[in-house]
Amino acid sequence: MRNNWHSIREYEALRAVITSGTTNGAARLLGVSQSAVSRSIGQLEARLNLVLFERRGGRLRPTAEGLRLNGNLDRLFDAIAVLNGADPEEPGSGTLRLAAPPSLSQMVANQMASFIALHPGQRLSLETCTSSGLVSRISEDAVDLGFTHADLTHSSMELIPFHESVAVCILPRNHPLARHEIITPEHLHGQDFISILRRHIVRSRLDRLFAEAGSVPNRVAEVATGLSAATLVRAGTGVSVICPFPVVREDDQTLVVRPFLPRFIYRTSFAVSTMRPLSRVARAFMRHVKLSLA
């Protein structure tokens, strides 16, 4: 039977061990002894009758129950910050390290600009990397918050969707297919086509749609991002099917944009670590992005 009393010291120990990965590191963060941290974690596990950590390669990795409990503590520590005279909506100190693929980097940079305008003095950094690179950067604690279109799976990373887009077909101005209100795989048979690279999951989805329709586009180029595809389409190289966010605007006069059927969804997500709690500034930036796109 669980006890109903709560210990802030135990919750602080939980967060510190998740952040550092060891009881030694947690003790340094909290300014207490290693035995005090171990004792707090043991008491918390006993009180809740849960296993919160497992040992892997000399480090303590939080279990699913540990991560769930840690996520539920955000509001508690925000409330404590208010009691201590701080504003939990204010980002706080330290540099927020962001990472995004080229197709999202301009959108993220715009969000950084508006965020800094609201929070002068807050430091942000942005690096551009591939989706696979994003996984390693987050796992290595080199990035606090990532952005991706990809449906990535990794034990050290969680995706939090914040935007959905429907696939569109983009065509050069005055292209013969522009007379159609909707583009289907059949329309693209034999057309010069710019594909996304095979390593992307969306490529296999599109290939399957074309195969089911008996349509064989003339693949003249392969690119890594929708941004590159749009550049080639503007140059008249061919047509493409891409995620429009944030590459194509509704008022874009340099392209013809048509709905593509069968309809499928692209999800744009935040990528966060499952091994470390989100910082206050990371949570504030995520709120800022979601509100700006609402």
Image (cartoon, grey):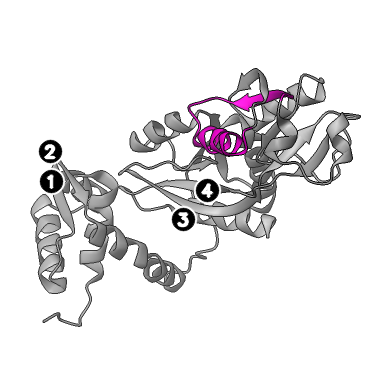
Q: Is residue 188 above or below residue 79?
A: above
Secondary structure of the residue carrying numbered label 1: strand
Left/right of residue 39 with respect to residue 100 in the rendered view: left
C-alpha separation, residue under disc 3 versus residue under disc 4: 19 Å
* Circle 3/circle 4 CB separation < 8 Å: no
CA distance for labels 1 and 3? 27 Å
Res 121 → quadrant: top right
Q: Which corner quadrant of the image does residue 70 belong to?
A: bottom left
Say which of 10 and 213 sits in front: 213
- Looking at the rendered structure, the secondary structure element under dot 3 is helix
Membership of 195 in magenta stretch: yes
Image: magenta residue range: 190-214
> What whole-number distance in Å separates the C-alpha atoms at marks 3 and 2?
28 Å
Q: CA distance from mark 4 to mark 1?
A: 29 Å
Q: Amino acid at mark 2?
A: Gly
Q: Badges 2 and 1: C-beta atoms under 8 Å apart? A: yes
Q: Determine which residue is flagged by label 2.
A: 58
Give the mark nearest the N terminus, 3 or 2: 2
Query: Label 1: which residue?
Result: 55
Asked if the residue under mark 4 is in contact with the one under mark 2, i.e. CB atoms within 8 Å, the reply is: no
Residue located 50% across and 40% down the image: 150
Residue carrying label 3: 280
Query: Where is mark 4, residue-wise?
Result: 269
User: Which of the two marks, 2 or 4, is nearer to us in this view?
Assistant: 4
Q: Nearer the viewer, mark 3 or mark 4?
A: 4
Q: Please state the total of marks drawn on the protein image.
A: 4
